[in-house]
Amino acid sequence: MDGSSPKTKVYKRRWLIVSLFCLYSMSNAYQWIHLNIIANIITKYYNASLPEDRFQRETTVDWLSMIYMLAYIPLIFPSTFLLNKKGLRVCALAGAFLNALGAWLKVACVSQDRFAVLMFAQTICAIAQIFILGLPAKIAAVWFGPNEVSTATSLGVFGNQVGVAIGFLVPPILVPNSDSLDEIGNDLSIMFYAGAGYMTLLFILVIIIFKERPPHPPSKAQMLALQNVHEEHYGRSLLNLFKNIGFDLLTITYGVNTGCYYAISTLLNPIILEYYPGHEESAGQIGLTIVIAGVGGSIAAGIWLDKTRTYKGTTLGIYFLSMAGMVAFTFTLDIKILWVVFLCAGALGFFMTGYLPVGFEFAAEITYPESEGTSSGLLNASAQFFGIILTIGCRAMINKVGTLGSNLLISGTLLVGTICTGFIAADYRRQEAGKEILEQMDNALEIEISEKYTEKSRMADAENDNRI
């Protein structure tokens, strides 16, 4: 390569970076849902420090999940500003530290009159997530080559999904329902100490291993982004995103889909227990099925996008199938055949959680060259907003009408989201930028070859003249 030409290179360290991110993203996602999947047990243990009214008591416990959504909305703008100005390493350190701090505060919450302390600890973990959710697309763009970006984003989201899966599976096993509040307290203590130790180890590993960026950018598109980073104005970037009609629509539809996922996850315990009383472990296993299937969906979608680059078609297809999966899940709960519920839950998870990385990548395509961290952050803020609305709405429906009404509400919401997705234009700006760079390189190469050929011809003509 010519010495004056900028160098691009992919490094093996990129796999270590994305793997470490997956692990601490996983631990934060685990803390999001690990209390709500045993909501009836948490309500029983902390009953003395909860409101007396049933709806208020259950909604208060729901806020252990919804605080993640609420905290994200006002803090997304300063966090994305920090990501753009200070970079990946600072955000990774902040997220890992707060995640570990919240886990240790939960250790001090094992007392029936300390629900307020538990909520405070969960709030610290919720603040940690703002330094996590927007990173997958940014890590992929900074560390991975052009044909690996979608796969890398999927792997980044993968850690979050596995964390939710563990949060569904482990708590019902570690903290089984019991008539003894002391026994429940001891089980909670074991769960909290184990989590705090693991998250502290991850914080130490982030300090040692996580780097800001590779010595050389991995792609021409990322090289241009790095060249423009000093000229980037955060407020102007936000304004450009809000002016992008396609991104505005995607922000709403992404928020609706992911908000439905948040509502189902938060309320899975009461949804399953209404049809299968005493099956707390089954509720956790159904949640695990949803997430594990979603992991497969995320990876499959990432590979598919890298090969086809059909972002709009893939987004629309997955959205429609998410709605179909929710309808099937809704009408199989009441047939009292548990394996059918698992099957439909798996289909729902494959498409609904498989949608997450697709939305990130579609946004990166239609908003290029704006920062991936900013666009991802706005998508997540929309998801948190709709997650709160849908969770509260579904809880009210469960209490007033029943689980069927709640599930039909989610199904109808997904139908509206599918229709709106069809109106998003397939404006693939990142692909076009890559093509322009390749064309410029080809043109430069043709000119160079032409000049060399002309020079050789001139020299050959001069030599012939000398011979004559």
Image: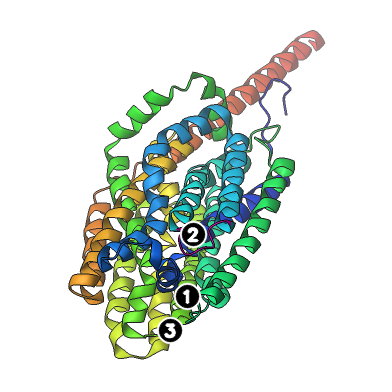
Circle number at residue 304 = 2
Closer-to-camera residue (203/301): 203
Task: Using a 10 Å C-alpha cutoff, classify the residue at mark 2 as few (fewer than 14 neighbours), some (14 to 19) or many (20 or more).
Answer: some
Q: Give the position of the C terminus as an image quadrant.
A: top right
State whether residue 155 appears in this view.
no
Task: Using a 10 Å C-alpha cutoff, classify the residue at mark 3 as few (fewer than 14 neighbours), some (14 to 19) or many (20 or more).
Answer: some
State whether residue 64 appears in this view.
yes
Closer-to-camera residue (414/128): 128
Closer-to-camera residue (67/215): 67
Secondary structure under badge 2?
helix
The amino acid sitting under disc 3 is His
On whether residue 271 falls in the magenta region, the answer is: no
Whole-percent x and y of residue 75? Answer: 42, 38
Label 1 – label 3 distance at C-alpha: 9 Å
Please give the residue where the numbered disc 1 appears in the rendered image. Answer: 284
Secondary structure under badge 1?
helix
Please give the residue where the numbered disc 3 appears in the rendered image. Answer: 279
Of labels 3 and 2, earlier in sequence is 3
The amino acid sitting under disc 1 is Gly
Q: What residue is shown at x 45% (from left), y 70% (from top)?
A: 45
Of labels 1 and 2, earlier in sequence is 1
Task: Using a 10 Å C-alpha cutoff, classify the residue at mark 1 as few (fewer than 14 neighbours), some (14 to 19) or many (20 or more).
Answer: many
Whole-percent x and y of residue 338? Answer: 40, 88
Furthest residue toward left: 401
- In the image, the segment drawn in magenta is 108-114
Label 3 – label 2 distance at C-alpha: 37 Å
Circle number at residue 381 = none
Q: Is residue 403 above or below residue 88?
A: below
Q: Is residue 245 above or below residue 332?
A: above
Residue 264 appears left or right of 148: left
